[in-house]
Amino acid sequence: MKRAIFIPLLFLVLGTPCAAQTCTSNCRTCQSSACVKQSAASSKVKPADRKSATSVEVLYFHGKQRCKTCNAIESETRAVVHDELASEVKAGKVRFRVVDITTPEGKVLAAKYKVSWSSLFVVQHKGGKEKVNNLTQFAFANASNNAKGFRAALKSKVQKLLK
């Protein structure tokens, strides 16, 4: 019963399901290749707007096997972005992506950010430039044992980068 209620509410909050119809979310979080391609195409800022727009992308990288802490990082990050930063997501200012580094698409992003294992990055896109913040060490130290502190600090970091 809870799942039946949750999924329609998820679509109301996050938008329509992915084109590949293989996920229960939208293209911002699905990792099927059809979804990733559609997501990349639909989320691009127009060239004229790229230099003036400020946006933040939260990237959670993972491999095939994940520990309790890895799963906590993903779930706590997802909660912050989709619950506490919902208006910024809706406005297109914040985006959350879960990247499986074992997929072809994931390998490309992992190479770009020099990632070789589970990692959390917060990337500011402003004035046509990227400012990369590696929060991996902080995430592993806090996501499981200090979820409240992790959420508050991540939200603060994203909000700061949006200014």
Image (cartoon, grey):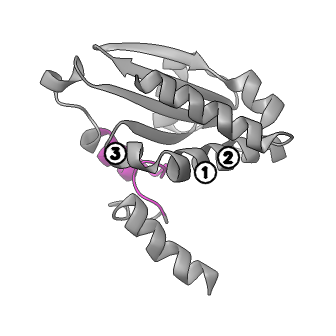
Q: Name the image quarter holding residue 8.
A: bottom left
> Pointer 2: what residue?
76
- Residue of label 1: 79
Upstream in sequence: badge 2 or badge 3: 3
Q: Are marks 2 and 3 in contact (CB under 8 Å)?
A: no
Residue 23 appears in the rendering: yes
Vertical placement of 88 versus 1: above or below?
Answer: above
Whether residue 65 is visible: no
Amino acid type indicated by mark 3? Ser
Tell me the kind of residue under disc 1.
Answer: Ala
Closer-to-camera residue (69/30): 69
The residue that label 3 is drawn on is 39
Graded by Cα atoms within 10 Å as few (under 14), some (14 to 19) or many (20 or more), the crowding at tag 2 reads some
Q: Based on the picture, tell me whether residue 35 belongs to the magenta stretch.
A: yes
Q: Which residues are magenta?
A: 25-40
Indicate the amino acid at tag 2: Glu
Dot 1 surroundings within 10 Å: few (below 14), some, or many (20 or more)? some
Q: Residue at x 54, y 33 (%)?
A: 59
